[in-house]
Image (cartoon, grey):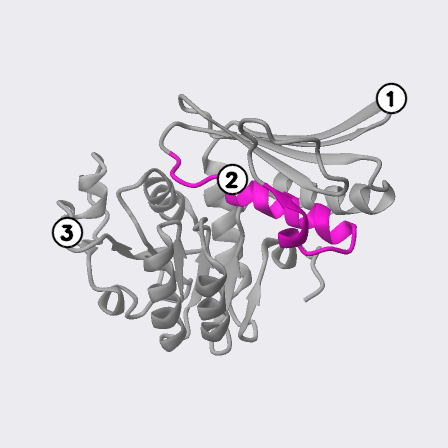
């Protein structure tokens, strides 16, 4: 098994972390090389398989990224911005592919990730699914085809535990729409409305977030014009699709030149 890429999973105890551990373990083309958790977590030192309630996998949960990455070729990271930025530097030092599904990153965070990408492959996306990434392509094309008589709204729904809004996927879609019209998203971004807001400004891209229950992820991009409305939608019904996309990205990154890539690059739809 040492001839296949070794994968380290960050945040192994979380919903995505557990899914990633399971997906790597089931894959014939990669192996589980490490499982990371924050210092002081109750899983530290335990076999990750047993901690998840199953059979032992021979990999102990660690709180030392450098130790966990020894002999690994990729790290998959759906954690928090501060942890992701720190890991970007460490993964670059190890020349390991860093797959980032973390959302809520600031411009400063992304600038630090860009620096790390000078030395290693980083694949970052607000959503790892094939369908969502194809949707961004469609949104960009539709936004370019329709003028600003068509207002654009991005509506997203997620489970009650999600801590950031709008979602990373919603921002991806908003960026695609803005790009289709020749703008940066910051120029046309309109946050959720409350109170007496006044009339909508022409050309703005609005965002609305719904939180509740166990919704995995639903996104609608609405183009509302005079007398007609076009809606492009994506619904996720199985969290494993994000894990599959992340694993695909980890394999794709093997042997690539250092750089900051997206899932569109992995799918052959990007400009890189």
Q: Quadrant of residue 182?
A: bottom right
- Residue 189 forms part of the magenta stretch: yes
- The residue range painted magenta reads 162-190
In this rendering, does residue 167 appear at all? Answer: yes
Q: Left or right? Give the position of 49 relative to 264.
A: left
- What residue is rendered at 73% in x and 42% in y? 139
Q: Which residue is mark 2?
A: 166
Secondary structure type for disc 2: loop
- Residue 191 forms part of the magenta stretch: no
Marks 3 and 2, Cα distance to the nearest angstrom?
A: 32 Å
Q: Which residue is mark 3?
A: 44
Query: Mark 3 or mark 2, which has the lower sequence index?
Result: 3
Secondary structure type for disc 3: loop
For the image shown, how many numbered marks are present on the structure? 3
**Nearest the camera: 269 or 47?**
269
Note whether 131 is above or below 36 in the view shown.
Answer: above
Q: Which residue is mark 1?
A: 227
**Nearest the camera: 4 or 137?**
137
Marks 3 and 1, Cα distance to the nearest angstrom?
A: 59 Å
């Amino acid at each position: 098994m040492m001839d296949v890429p070794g994968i380290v999973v960050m945040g192994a105890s979380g919903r995505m972390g557990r899914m990633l551990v399971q997906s790597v373990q089931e894959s014939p083309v990669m192996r589980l090389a490490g499982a990371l958790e924050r210092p002081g977590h109750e899983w530290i030192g335990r076999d990750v398989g047993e901690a998840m309630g199953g059979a032992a996998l021979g990999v102990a949960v660690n709180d030392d990224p450098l130790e966990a990455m020894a002999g690994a070729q990729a790290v998959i990271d759906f954690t928090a911005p501060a942890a992701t930025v720190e890991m970007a530097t460490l993964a670059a030092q190890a020349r390991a592919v860093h797959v980032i599904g973390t959302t809520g990153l600031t411009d400063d965070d992304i600038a630090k990730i860009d620096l790390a990408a000078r030395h290693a492959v980083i694949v970052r996306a607000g959503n790892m699914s094939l369908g969502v990434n194809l949707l961004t392509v469609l949104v960009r094309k539709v936004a370019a085809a329709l003028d600003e008589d068509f207002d654009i709204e991005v509506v997203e729904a997620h489970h009650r535990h999600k801590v950031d809004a709008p979602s990373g996927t919603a921002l991806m879609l908003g960026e695609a729409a803005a790009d289709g019209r020749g703008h940066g998203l910051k120029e046309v971004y309109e946050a959720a409305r409350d109170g007496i807001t006044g009339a909508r400004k022409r050309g703005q891209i609005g965002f609305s977030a719904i939180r509740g229950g166990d919704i995995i992820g639903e996104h609608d991009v609405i183009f509302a014009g005079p007398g007609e409305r076009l809606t492009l939608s994506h619904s996720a019904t199985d969290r494993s699709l994000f894990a599959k996309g992340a694993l695909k990205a980890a394999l794709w990154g093997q042997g690539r030149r250092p750089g900051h890539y997206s899932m569109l690059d992995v799918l052959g739809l990007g400009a890189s």
